[in-house]
Amino acid sequence: MATRYYEKDGNVGLLKGKTIAIIGYGSQGHAHALNLRDSGLDVMVGLPESSQSRVKATAAGLRVLSTADAAKAADTMMILVPDHVQGDLYKSAIEPHLAPGKTIMFAHGFAIRFEQIKPPSTVDVTMIAPKAPATACASCSRKAWVFRRWLRCIRMLRAKPSKTRSRMPWRWVA
């Protein structure tokens, strides 16, 4: 069973001084990036040079880098690109820049479950799963949606294989 954390369990101070990269700037990426920035955290957006979202993220006042540069600079990365892109993007732009102690995050576990992404044991892996489409959540207060999920996730760290659960290849432990 996964351990669940709530706002009372989080401490945003743990993210102060850390660099956070939001990889992707679609319906979820913009909500995460803007909320975290509005909460006073150091946030950047990682996008391909050809992405049309670069203009939107720059217009919102966010620092925009290539995905590889964002992965290299970030302590924590939230991967919010479509499932069918994640595996190749991870291998080409993110994996080469993973160092012990970094954290990679997902909105759901498809890429991990189907082993399109196999993070090294030296990085922390977490998941923040929205309870509604990001466009609906973004129309509410960004802080009421994204920030609560980040607070819940601050203490969820190492993802480890579980030999006892055949349907889920990992389990969350604090």
Image (spheres, rainbow, N blue to C red):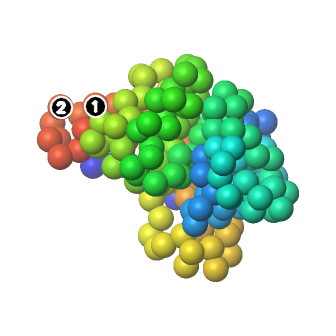
Residue highlighted by disc 1: 161
Pinpoint residue 37: horizontal percent, then vertical percent: 77, 55
Marks 1/2 in contact by CB < 8 Å: the verdict is yes
Identify which residue is drawn at 41% across, 38% down.
87
Q: Secondary structure at mark 2?
A: loop
Identify which residue is drawn at 34% across, 49% down.
110
Q: What's the CA distance linking mark 1 and mark 2? A: 6 Å
Pinpoint residue 109: horizontal percent, then vertical percent: 36, 49
Q: Is residue 111 left or right of residue 134?
A: left
Instruction: Count residues near mark 1 (Cα–Cα under 10 Å), then give few for <14, some for 14-19, many for 20+.
Output: few
Q: Amino acid at mark 1?
A: Pro
Q: Is residue 3 left or right of residue 165?
A: right
User: Where on the picture, by quarter, is residue 131?
Assistant: bottom left
Q: Is residue 5 visible?
A: no
Q: Which mark is residue 68?
A: none
Instruction: Count residues near mark 2 (Cα–Cα under 10 Å), then give few for <14, some for 14-19, many for 20+.
Output: few
Q: Amino acid at mark 2?
A: Lys
Q: Is residue 85 left or right of residue 15?
A: left
User: Where on the picture, by quarter, is residue 142?
Assistant: bottom right
Q: Is residue 122 above or below residue 31?
A: above
Identify which residue is drawn at 45% across, 43% down.
86
Q: Is residue 94 above or below residue 146?
A: above
Pinpoint residue 166: horizontal percent, then vertical percent: 14, 41
Q: Secondary structure at mark 1?
A: strand
> Which sits in the foreground, 99 or 46?
46
Pinpoint residue 106: horizontal percent, then vertical percent: 47, 48
Q: Is residue 154 above or below residue 163?
A: below
Q: Which mark is residue 163?
A: 2
